[in-house]
Image (cartoon, grey):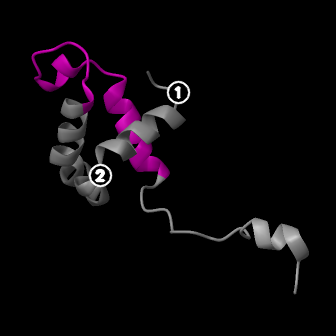
């Protein structure tokens, strides 16, 4: 058997799924988050995850990011977490 016990206990690194949301799309999301939601016509001053998610899905195609039309809330949270945005 190739690799011994370590090979049996741990999976080898795989390529995984290709990246679908590019850095420019992530930058667009971060740009939106760094602005007050009132600048976009919302009543509350700060973004909620629900409003941010809906805003991204609604305006993604017109901004040139059609992949973001189907982005999920957990993915938005992951982008914000990876960007250190609270």
Note whether 68 is above or below 40 in the view shown. Answer: below
Count the labels in the image. 2
Question: Quick one: 24 or 18, which is closer to the camera?
Answer: 18
x and y percent of residue 70 in the render?
24, 56
Q: Is residue 47 above or below residue 71?
A: above
Q: Is 39 on the left or on the right of 67, as rendered?
A: left
Q: Residue at x 46, y 55 (%)?
A: 22
- Mark sitting on residue 84: 1
Q: Residue drawn 17% across and 17% down?
A: 38
Which class describes the residues within 10 Å of circle 2: few (<14), some (14-19), or many (20+)? some
Considering the numbered disc 2 on the image, is that residue within a helix, a strand or a loop?
loop
Q: Which residues are magenta?
A: 23-49
Q: Earlier in the sequence, mark 1 or mark 2?
A: 2
Q: State the SS at label 1.
A: loop
Picture quarter containing residue 16?
bottom right
The quadrant in which the C terminus is found is top left
Q: Is residue 76 left or right of residue 79?
A: left
Q: What distance separates the C-alpha of mark 1 from that of mark 2? A: 19 Å
Question: Which residue sits at x=9%, y=16%?
Answer: 43
Q: Position of residue 61 (x, y in %)?
A: 21, 54
Q: Is residue 35 magenta?
A: yes
In the rendered view, does 57 fall on the left or right side of 78?
left
Quadrant in which the N terminus appears: bottom right
Disc marking residue 74: none
Mark 2 — residue? 71
- Mark 1 near mark 2, Cβ–Cβ under 8 Å? no
Is the residue marked by circle 1 packed among few (<14), some (14-19), or many (20+) residues within 10 Å?
few
């Amino acid at each position: 058997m190739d690799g011994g016990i370590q090979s049996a206990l741990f999976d080898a690194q795989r390529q995984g799924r290709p990246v679908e949301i590019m850095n420019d799309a992530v930058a667009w999301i971060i740009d939106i988050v760094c602005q007050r939601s009132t600048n976009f016509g919302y009543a509350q001053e700060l973004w909620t995850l629900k409003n941010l998610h809906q805003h991204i899905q609604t305006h993604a195609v017109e901004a040139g990011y059609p992949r973001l039309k189907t982005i999920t809330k957990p993915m938005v949270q992951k982008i914000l977490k990876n960007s250190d945005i609270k």
